[in-house]
Every structure is written in structure tokens, then in C-alpha cells.
Amino acid sequence: MAEKLRDLSQPIDVTLLDATVAAFYGTGSKEERSAADQILRDLQNNPDMWLQVVHILQNSQNLNTKFFALQVLESVIKYRWNALPVEQRDGIKNYISDVIVQLSSNEVTFRQERLYVNKLNIILVQVLKHEWPARWSSFIPDLVAAAKSSETICENCMAILKLLSEEIFDFSRGEMTQQKIKELKSSLNSEFRLIHELCLYVLSATQRPELIRATMATLHAFLSWIPVGFIFESPLLETLLKFFPVAAYRNLTLQCLSEVAALQFGDFYNMQYVKMYTIFMMQLQAILPPETIPDAYANGSSEEQAFIQNLALFFTSFFKNHMRILEITPENRAALLLGLEYLIGISYVDDTEVFKVCLDYWNVFVLELFEAHNQMEPAAAVSMMGLQMVPGIVDGTGTAVQQRRQLYSGPLSKLRMLMICRMAKPEEVLIVEDENGNIVRETMKDNDVLVQYKIMRETLIYLSHLDHEDTEQQMLKKLSKQLNGEDWSWNNLNTLCWAIGSISGSMVEEQENRFLVMVIRDLLNLCEITKGKDNKAVIASNIMYVVGQYPRFLRAHWKFLKTVVNKLFEFMHEMHPGVQDMACDTFLKIVQKCKRKFVTQQVGENEPFVSELLSNLATTIADLEPHQIHTFYESVGHMIQAESDNAKRDEYLKRLMSLPNQKWAEIIGQASQSIDILKNQDVIRSVLNILQTNTSVASSLGPHFFPQISLIFLDMLTVYRMYSELVSSTIAEGGPFASRTSFVKLLRSVKRETLKLIETFVDKAEDLPHIGKQFVPPMMDPVLGDYARNVPDARESEVLSLFATIINKYKGEMLEDVPRIFEAVFQCTLEMITKNFEDYPEHRLKFFSLLRAIGTHCFQALIQLSSQQLKLVIDSINWAFRHTERNIAETGLSLLLEILKNFQASGFQNQFYKTYFLTIEQEIFAVLTDTFHKPGFKLHVLVLQHLFCVVDGLTEPLWDATSVPYQYTDNAMFVRDYTIKLLGTSFPNMTATEVTKFVDGLLSSKHDLPSFKNHIRDFLVQSKEFSAQDNKDLYAEEAAAQRERERQRMLTIPGLIAPSELQDEMVDS
């Protein structure tokens, strides 16, 4: 059966094909489905299959089979169109057009076969992208004439026009060359008059709702780019506004009006805009009064909700582009303020997407007012704030700015209220209400909310600058309603406190102090008078958030600072989820900003606060979890770091570390009696915890952590070595599964933490390289030697990042150690990561980061490698940038670029490039053209540019004289030839002239990066388009079939070429 289908020498058996497609989509057994799948794939890949398409479409009744046939046809049109003889192209063109006309001329078949017709429309537009305007110049007149013959054909013509507009203006990037896009756009523009007349004619003549909707949808697609005269110098706007009050067309009309509102071109059509806006507002009030919007949305149908979303888009577009013209006369100002009223109403709608649209606009609107206000003379600005009015100071612009601010003072005040009521949650707040109404600790950060918070915070700060008094009054008034219970709810208190915290720094210090004293006093009172665990947790979270935002106030008021910190210590004993975490985070945040206050003896105190804290340390942290204790220790590290007296600082450090050090000494003491104690899981956990505590302090104390790390360093390395041997022997005995047992995982955590502690200390001790450097020799064997001796599953990737950090810190001083590092980690890590692209992902990234550190700071060490070793390095870099994992590929490419530049200046450039130039060029072209490595485009281009530029500076030939019969005059000529051959074999679908033109273009633009990059971009688009304009008449059918077979062969070889989707990322650089 399958063979009968695969034999395409006679017309295909459509009944059999229907059965196969049905089996593929059917509910039969898995085997049946995969057999059908295989047959369909084979047919799809057969270069002659498309010749059967018409036969299938005429004889099959099954929609899925028709879709399958059209898919085959679509791929021929996309990739092989220009290779087909003219009569075949015309045949396809006429057949598709006829079927579309036939199906859409009859109301019944048009509705029944709608999906099929839609697919045919898409195919027609694909043909148009090749044929129109050059080879099918009459297309638009033909289409418009057909549309006038029947209403259903007209409706379908609208759909085709809409598709065409979208293909050319919205989706063309990366699908067609820039020249082609330009051609199509100008054709559409020049022929638009006919389309415009057709749309207007339909809207005035027809009564059919489907046709009116199709026409509006088409207009909507066209409005953003058509010549302006068609909009303003024709009855188009009046026609649209006439349809606006009709419920069935309301949304489509509104979308069209929003497109018009978003257009901008000087003042020429201002009057039309004013007229459009005033008529619109009159109609809108009848449809939807502004004060009912949030409820109307909450209770509305999906159509009504979409209407409110579209309204938001209309108002924001109109105000962004044409607000100024409405400010001129009193009547227009009233309409403008009413529009703002609507937009504020829409901003209260409980829907994130709608709110985002409004918020983006409010941000722009407030920023513009704030900037105008900020650019005025300081004296004028002061007088405008209402503090004093000095006659004669405010000049013309000042008056205008002042008038605008007065005009908008009402909406701005309502906006402040909106921002306060809807404030998004800041990152620091960990305590949230879940969907069941319980107060819980947040488990996942929501990035959308964080972005929203950032915009809202910015907007509120501008609003606050425009009127501090109003901002402060609104906040305090809302807070008093929380206290007297009139407005109390978790959400109200949260948004209010988040808003209060977010305007930190926007008031002058005096006002801020006055404001905060009231806020903090009220919040502490609220905490006392409110009962209930959840309520207390919410209030605690808000107190912590607000105080964390105002370090300036705390620095200036020691009494408040001390009260707040003691309150945090109180919260550290509060068992409600999230409260302790937030208390520790807030403590860290406050200490970082006010650390000096804690080591200075304050008036009325007997000793600095840090000393008092260290005396009560054990009680304060008694109820905290290990990870919270680590944060606490990090905070105290910051305090101690602020102490400038060395003796005091060391004494504080000793007191801080006395608890963990006691435990450490105890464990090491017991281990010296019996080593087995270290294998006890509880002991291993204690060791891990002690090391983590040390890492936390090292991260905040920096180089001053030296006395502590010296104390435990050698014992720590001994434990490291012992655990490492234990891991290796356990894995060797128990096989790969042993590496997943909790015992081995725990041991490895200790090894990792040890490496992390050393890396943190080395990283922070940057001003004192001699201190950190002395820790390197003792680590060579326990850490590096151990890495090499271990079985792969027991090697810690942190070893690689530790040495990368050491080399990045001590740079050239590490030169003599590089061979040792190389020997220990290079070969054995490569064996782990070059088996495939998936295993050991951590080792991959860190290995290439280590290589990059060596390449950047110890380049001399690379020159001293043997040629085998250097080949390994270059191969491993090629391996890196073949990864589809973005970070690894980018690290590989950046490293390659640095090594190429270093070799260029090293004196060894001739030998280096002679060995590696061609390999690198070939590898880069492979990843550039295979579409799996799109994000690396920018770096691929830079490497190619470097290679093409370096050629001119080489004094020895790049080619091997024994194997190249033809003697080239210089390297540039050889590279040109080599590149043409390389690309010619990789892209058999492109003609030799095109490849040569591309390579010459590269060589001529190599010193100008932007045009070099564009040149490559166009080549990539073209390579996919199968364009063969110059010798299209010479194409024979066999040639096309031969090419197609060659292309199939190439597709089976990864990395050669896959002319499929082309990048969007390529546009970003």
C-alpha cells in the first residue's frame, strides 16, 4: 500500500491518501499513526510530489488531505518558485485563483469551506510575494473588479488584501530581502487608490454584517501605512464615526480610529483630529458613562471588555500624539479633561493588560509635565509650588507651564490616588496573600509585577515632585483611615505602604522627616492595637518595608534607628512564615546603609551598638533558621567592616565567630581522636553550616576576614581532601547511582562551600593581592590534584570557577602556575564535555570562563603550549561556539575574538593563522548559516570581520603550496577564492555570480562594520529565498530536482545549512 502511494509516476490514489491522512489524525494504534506519519513525510520530501497537488485537491473530500497537499505546494512556492518553468508557475497561479473565486462566489460553499479558503488565500499571497508587481501587474485591478461582482467574493478579497498588507508590513523581516520589501511597499502604495475606493464603496453600499466587518478589518491593517490623504481628504473618518455607535461594529471601528490616532505628521490635519475627537466623545458618553467603567468591565461580556481595552488604546494613542491641540480652546479643554477622566476610570479596571496600557501612558504624561516644570528657572519653580509669588519672575514659558499644570491639577490628584491604591509589590516584600486569602511567604518572584512596580514608582515620584503637599496629604489621610478601621484591609495597607516606601528621596529632608515620624509612629501604633497573627504579620511586613526604604532618615535619627533595629530583632522571634526572612533581609539592608552608626558610641549609650549586639548574639538568633543566621552574620560583618581601628575590628570579628569557631574546634578535636566522626551525617551538616557562616562574613568583611580564614584554612583543606576521597571511593564502589545518594550530595556540598569560601575571600581581598596569593600554593594539590584524580562524576565545577577568579584577580602574577592548572583540569574536563552538548552543564560554562581568564590575562602561557595543546585549545573553543546554549556559545566566541587579537599582535601571527585561519572561517560560517545559533550573530560577524581584515597583515601565504596548483599573488586573493568555494558548495541553490558578489561585497566593506553586517544579513535572507533572477530562463526541471536532492542531503548533515526560519535576533545588533 505504502509503495503504491510512494510511486509518483502515475496519478496518486486519492482514496488511499485520504485513508493514510485519516490514520495519521485518527485514534488508531501508535504503530498505525507512526507508519502513516512516515509515508506522509516521504511524500512531502519527494521533489515531484507537488505535481500531484491539483489532482488531490480536485478529488479529495477530506479537509486534512487538502491541507496536506497545500502544505507541499506552499513549500515549493516558498523555496523553489523561481526554479519552475513559466508555464508551471502560471498553471499554479491560475488554478489557485480559480478555486478561490469558485468557492467564494457562493454563500453556502464559502461558509462551509471557510478554513480551506483561508489556506488558499495564504498560498495566493505567497505566490504574490514572488510574482507581483513584475509578472502579475494587473493583480490589484483584477481583484477589485472581482470584488464588485458578488458580496461573498468581495468579503474574501478583503481577507486577501489584509493578508497581503500583513505579509509585507508586519512579517516581512527576515523573509524577503530589503530590496524586495521596498518594491512591494511602493506597489501597494501606488495602487492603493483602487482599494480605498472599494472599501468606501462597500461601507456605503452593503447591509451585510460579515462584509462590513471584513472591510473594517482590512482597513485596520492598511491604516498604519497608507498615504495620509486617503484618510483625511476623503469621507473615511466620517464613515467610521457613523458606524461607531452600532454595537456590532463598535470594536472594529474603535481599532481603526486608534490606528488613525497613532499617526503623526506635523500640524497639517490638526482640525480634522479635533473634529474626530469631539464627535467621538459625544458618541462615547451615550454608550458608556465614565464613572461606571470598572463595574461595566467586571460584569461585561467579552465583547464589552474588549471595547474597554480598545478605548484604553484609543485614548493613550490620541493623547500621546495630539494632546496639545486639544488644550487651545475652552470647549476642547473640557472634552480633553473628560477623556482623561475616562482613562483614569479605565485604569481602575481589574485587568493587568488594560492597566499596563494605561500605566505606560501615565508614565509618559507625568514625565513630560515634570520635565517642563523642572527646566524652569529655580525661582519660578519655587513660586509655582505656591510657596511665594514673586511678581514678574515668571516669564512667558513659565506662565505656559504653570497654566498646563493648573489645567491638569485635578487629573493629577486623582492619578496620585490611583497609584497609591494600585501600587505593585516591590521585590523586598516577601509576605503575600495567597488565592485562599491566607498570609504566606512568597515562593516565586513575579517579574511582571517587578517591572510594573518600577514604572509605577517612577510615575509616583514625578507626581510627588509636581505637588509634594497633595502627595503627603493623600497618604496620611489614607493611613489615618487604616488606624480608625474605616478603610482597613490587608491590600489597602500594603499598597499604601508600598507607595510610601517608593517615593523615598523625593521630598526635601525636613518634610521627609516630618512625614516619616508620623508614618512610623502610626504603623507602630497599628501593630500594638491590631489583634490576630495574620494581621500582625502584614503590619510587620509593611513596617519593615517602609523603614528599609528611608536610610537617610534612620541615619539622622539614632533613637528611631535603634527602635527599628530592636523591633526587627523582635520580629526575628516571630514564627509566622516570611516574617523572619524579611526581618533578616531588612536588617541587612539597613546595616549596609547605616553601618557607621553601629560602631560609633552614640550619645547616652555605654558602648557602641555592635558590642551590645555581640553580647546578646546567641539569644537574638536563637529562633532563626540556618539561612537566616547566615544573612544575620553577613549584616554584622558589614558593621565590623565600618570599624577603622584594627584591634577593635579583630576583637569584634573574634566575638562574632566565637560560636561557629567553638563548634569547629570541637569537631576537628574529635576527628583527631577518630577520623570516622567526620562521616556522621549530622557532623557533615554542622561542618557545612559553619563554612556557610564563614562565607557570609567573608562576603561583607572583605580583606579584614584574613585572621579568621587563616585560623581554619589548613584544617579545612584536610577535610576537603578527606571528603573528596570518600566521594570518589563511594562512586567507584557504588557506580553512577552512588553520586545521587544524599550522603554523597552532602559531602559534595561541603567541598563546594569550601571552594566558594576561598573564592569569596580571594575575590574580596582585591586591594591586598599578597594576602590572597599566599593561599594558592597550599591549594595546588588538595584542590587541583584532587580534581584530576577524581572520577568525572565527583569533580566539582567550582574548582574551575575558583581558578578563573584567582587568575582574573592576580592576572600576570599567575603566569607560572598556568601550566600546572592546565595539566590538572584541561584534558580531563574536555573528555567530560566533548562527548555531547548536554552532560555536565556547570563544568562547560566554568571551563570556558577559566580558558577566557587565561586567554585574557596569561596569554603568554598559551604561546608556550605545545602545538598539540594549542590545537586542543582551539578545538575546544570551536566546540564551545557550536553549543546552542547561549552563554557557552557567547563565552566561546568572545574568547576566540580575544585570542585572535592577541595572536595578531604576538609576533607568531603567521604560523598561527596558517594553521587555523581556514578552520575558523569554515566553523564560523557553519554556525552563522545554520539558524540554531542566531543569538551569536553579532559575534560571528565580528570574528569574520577580524579574519578578513587580518589577511592584509600576514607576510606568509595561507595556502599550502604543495596541494594548491594555482599560485596566488597574495593572501587576500586566496581567501576570496577559498570563501567563494566554501559558500558555493554549502549553498548549491545560489548561483556562482551571487556568491562571488557576496564575497566581494564582504571584502570591500570589511572596514565598515554596519555595512559589513547588513551585507551578511541580506545574504542569509537570500540564501533562503532561492532567488535566481539573473539566469532564471536557463533553469531546467532536472536542475531543480537535482538541487532539491542535494539540499535534502545537506539537511542530513548538521551544521551545513537549514534554510528554514531566519532570525529575528539578527535585527537587534
Image (cartoon, rainbow, N blue to C red):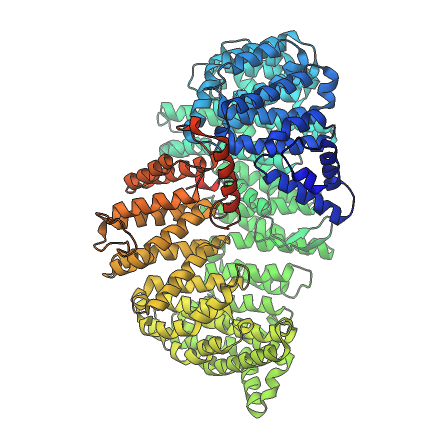
- Residue 292 seen from this side: no
Closer-to-camera residue (732/661): 732
- Residue 356 seen from this side: yes
Closer-to-camera residue (105/729): 105
Q: Residue at x 29, y 57 (%)?
A: 914
Q: Is residue 531 left or right of residue 132?
A: right
Closer-to-camera residue (778/261): 778
Q: Quadrant of residue 677?
A: bottom right
Q: Is residue 801 left or right of residue 526?
A: left
Compared with 753, 555 (above or below) is: above
Q: Measuring from the top left, give residue 656's x and y in whole percent.
A: 51, 75
Q: Measuring from the top left, give residue 813's x and y in whole percent.
A: 31, 71
Q: Residue at x 65, y 15 (%)?
A: 153
Compared with 915, 832 (above or below) is: below
Compared with 888, 64 (above or below) is: above
Q: Quadrant of residue 40?
A: top right
Q: Quadrant of the N terminus?
A: top right
Compared with 202, 339 (above or below) is: below
Q: Measuring from the top left, give residue 3's x and y in whole percent.
A: 68, 42
Q: Measuring from the top left, give residue 7's x and y in whole percent.
A: 65, 38
